[in-house]
Amino acid sequence: MAGCGDVDGVAVSVPTSQSFLTGVVDEARQLAFIPTPKGEIVAVDLAGGRELWRGAEGQRPLLIVEDRLLTLAVGSAGASVRQLALETGMPAGSEISLPLPVWVADREARLTVEAEIVPGGIGLVWQAWAGYTGGAPPPPAVRAASHKEAGGRLRVDLERAIAREFPGPPEPARPETVDITAVPPSPGGLAEARLGAASYSLRPGGGRDAPPRLVLEARDATGALLWALTVDETLPIRPPPLRR
């Protein structure tokens, strides 16, 4: 996986069938779940350009399973998978703690997670790194002693709310998955996606006398604007931390 250090040390990979503008999408239901620079998730009805809900602060989209949005949360209490109702964003199942090392929640750690749907739940391949976080460069022995690295595979049973280690070493990211980070691009950036005949893009908005904002636009096959929706009204230079 690439780019895990770009967004507070966490990167997520999802199957291409669900990847959408750095979030995830249910193409059949025409629902998209897009993270914002503020650290929220915005649920959007792509058919009409309506915001359904926003919330899940400090989480990032992971996968859509049936009628639930699964999110990844990493904080002082550790890492967990949370289950939210697609239509409302309300809890739709138990929070499931992940058996990851305690130091993975440190701000200085780097964590990558690759998610996929498997029979009975989801599979996660994770890798984490951490190193020396002091001031001046330390002696080689100190640097070596402070280095941490771990990884593994987990099977998450959504109905029983249990995550267990799955035997075997971490597998490398597969070509059918794509690397995403759970925040939109910087104010000068641009993200684009296509579903059917429509194309979607995240663009910086605002003007000289208006505060910067992040706008989701939908266009038809001719390029005509179908609708535009403000996803976030403030665009910080750096995204807020996932870990809290």
Image: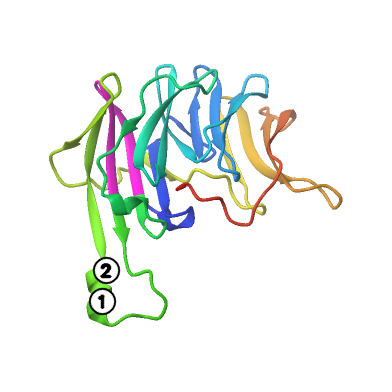
Return the residue nearer the eye: 48 or 232. Answer: 232
Q: Which residue is drawn at 24% across and 22% down?
A: 119
The kind of residue on which mark 2 rests is Ser
Q: Do the residues labelled 2 and 1 touch (CB within 8 Å)?
A: yes
How dense is the environment of label 2, judged by Cα within 10 Å: few (below 14), some, or many (20 and up)? Answer: few
Q: Mark 2 points at which residue?
A: 146
Q: Which residue is drawn at 38% across and 69% down?
A: 133
Q: Mark 1 points at which residue?
A: 142
Q: In which quarter of the image is residue 198?
A: top right
Please, what secondary structure does the residue beneath circle 1 have?
helix
Q: Magenta residues?
A: 112-127
Residue 56 image point, x, y percent: 52, 33
Left/right placement of residue 243 relative to residue 95 reads right
**Chief SS of the magenta region:** strand
Q: Which residue is drawn at 44% across and 30% down?
A: 18
How dense is the environment of label 1, judged by Cα within 10 Å: few (below 14), some, or many (20 and up)? Answer: few
Magenta span contains residue 91: no
Position above or below: 110 against 174: below
Asked whether residue 238 is in view, the answer is yes
Magenta span contains residue 115: yes
Position above or below: 244 against 129: above
The kind of residue on which mark 1 rests is Val
Residue 164 image point, x, y percent: 20, 34
